Image (spheres, rainbow, N blue to C red):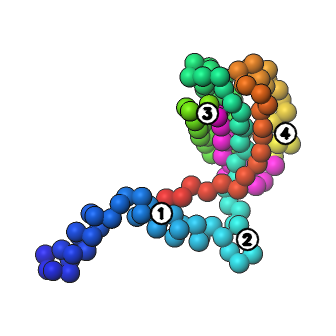
Amino acid sequence: LDASAMLARTLSRSLPRAARAAGALRHASRAMCTSDGVTVDMVARMWSCKVKDDPGAHKMDLVFDRFIEEVSMVEGVTGAARMVCKSEWDYSLILKFEDIDSLKAYMADHHDKVWGDFEPEVKELAVGNIKQQNFVYDDIE
């Protein structure tokens, strides 16, 4: 290797991983926004609540696994993600849709029935209120 290649290699190894990741995220975020605002490509519906503890989070996972299995048959649903904060016991489920029209169709044709089937179990496991909200969603890579 020549001196400049060795220097570049050494610097790339010495940069903290977080700094490199932050640079990649800044670059990716520019593609999500235009001068007109946030670009709407994929969208998501999120359910968020608190759970009591680890066993409560596991039980919530089991309920939402069945929920996801049911809604995965809906046209336009592209996947799901779950997040749990094990210090504050915040629990979130994200249901991803390929576009805004898919989310609108889900809300109009499926949400009330499917959510109605699972809501009692989720309410029983949730500590406090369950919040539902729609988002613009992007996987940043």
Amino acid found under the numbered disc labelled 4 = Asp
Amino acid found under the numbered disc labelled 3 = Glu
Q: Is residue 78 visible?
A: yes
Marks 4 and 3, how far apart at CA? 35 Å
As drawn, 82 above or below 62 = below
Which label sits in the foreground, 2 or 4? 2
Marks 2 and 1, how far apart at CA? 21 Å
Sequence order check, earlier mark of 2 and 1: 1
Marks 4 and 1, how far apart at CA? 40 Å
106 or 140: nearer the eye? Answer: 140
The kind of secondary structure element at disc 2 is: strand
Is residue 61 toward the left or the right of residue 141 in the image? right
Residue for badge 3: 88
As drawn, 96 above or below 124 = below
Residue at 66 percent of width and 46 percent of height: 96
Sequence order check, earlier mark of 4 and 1: 1
The kind of secondary structure element at disc 1 is: helix
Q: Quadrant of residue 9?
A: bottom left
The label on residue 22 is: 1
As drawn, 31 above or below 77 = below
Q: Quadrant of residue 70?
A: top right
Residue ranking furthest to the left: 1
What are the residue bounds of the magenta stretch?
90-104
Which label sits in the foreground, 1 or 3? 3
Residue 65 image offset from top left, x and y in percent: 62, 27
Circle 4 packing at 10 Å, graded few (<14), some (14-19), many (20+), is: few
Which label sits in the foreground, 4 or 3? 3
The label on residue 109 is: 4
The label on residue 37 is: 2
